[in-house]
Amino acid sequence: MKILLLSLNYTPEQIGIGPFSAGWAEHLACAGHRVTVVTAQPYYPDWRITEGHSNRWQRTVESGVEVVRCPHYVPRQPSGLKRVLHQGSFALAAMWPMLAHAIVRRPDLVIAVAPSLIAAPVARVAAVLAGAKSWLHVQDFELEAALATGLLNGGFPLNIATRFERRTLTGFDVTSTISPQMCRKLAAKGVPEGQIRELRNWADIDAIKPLDQPSPFRREWQISAPYVALYSGNIANKQGVDLVLDAARILRQRDDILFVICGNGPARARLETRAADLPNVCFRDLQPRERLADLLGLASVHLLPQIAGVADLVLPSKLANMFASGRPVVTTADSGTGIADEVNGMGVVVPPGDAAAFANAIDSLLRDPDRQARLGRTARIKAERDWARAAILHRCEREMERLAFK
């Protein structure tokens, strides 16, 4: 196949959507398909252009994939309007290489990854010009997430955004997403059942395995506490990381637990200020992906807070690797939501925003080593069964071939 992929995020971004878009493209290229990716300059999660890159046009070949990077606006503090401008600037910049590639190269399949949903119509137009099939992959329901985090309010802007979302989601030959609950949400938004596919994010179960000895980060970061409650990933409003600090404050008398918040993002500076009087909290920068196994193995328990209302809008990509590390997870989600269903049996689920329940779950789990070990083993088994990278990508490739040559 000749494949054209539009994705706002791509490597060298180490968390979020970027590694999955790159893994997808690299797998297809390794399988012998001709893959071109149109993407932005890397900026996530710091919301600034990554060191070693400049905000200009660039064309490279990376792991067998032709990569076209576009300049775009990156706000230092991403408010609602600034996010729209950010994604709109990417859509405009990506339009030219996407349409040129469609006309000259005539791809068999054009794929768009959302976010950015604003840029997705560019991929749809490219598919029409090329006479190709089209595929939209939804990692995140951006509109409802914006409402849940207060980035968007009701009224006229919401009406316009809702109509745009519906037209975009239903305009592709196939629309996929990452969990059963999100598939049901696609159907509720008008996408025909026959066009919906479930395409999970994956865990790298070969690289990330339960550690049988202390993580090297214990020595490097001089951690003496017997237990580590670890939050790793983006630090922004949607993640609800404030709850980690609330739990740390409640459990500050337990000097055997250290709360480690490892990551970057627009909310980190504010959280560091809030945690200034908490000796049981430390912050660390995002670590290189090749050290992910050591980082996740540092955890006695993984922390996955989410604000109310987002548990069926996104299935956090980091969850699969948490399971692969063989450590239990404490998360916040309402019963029956996608996150709650995934974590059930692999950790503890408490209501969103309930700091006391969150702290109690951490406390009780760390007081019960047998339960902690049992949940961790079950999490690893689930990762091997449901989240294995090779199996997921091979199924995806077969689906794409069936669509492209239908």
Image: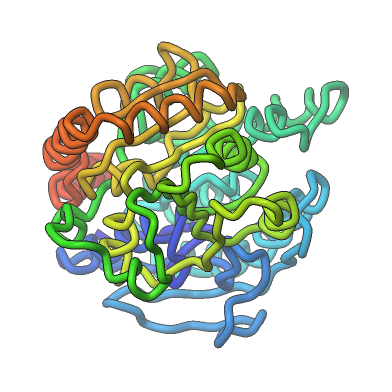
Q: Is residue 199 above or below residue 5?
A: above
245 w.r.t. 311: above or below: below
Instruction: Residue at 59% x, 22% y: name it.
Output: 354
Image location of residue 189, percent across then percent down: 54, 18
Among all residues in the image, which is located at the extreme right?
Answer: 156
Q: Is residue 135 in view?
A: no
Q: Picture coordinates of residue 297 (x, y %)?
A: 27, 56
Image location of residue 394, percent across then percent down:
15, 48
Quadrant position of residue 219: bottom left
Q: Residue at x 25, y 45 (%)?
A: 400
Q: Residue at x 52, y 45 (%)?
A: 114
| Residue drawn at (56%, 49%) of the image | 125
Quarter in which the C terminus is drawn: top left
Q: For residue 96, which quarter of the picture?
A: bottom right
- Asked whether, in this view, residue 111 is left or right of residue 283, the answer is left
Quadrant of the image containing the N terminus? bottom left
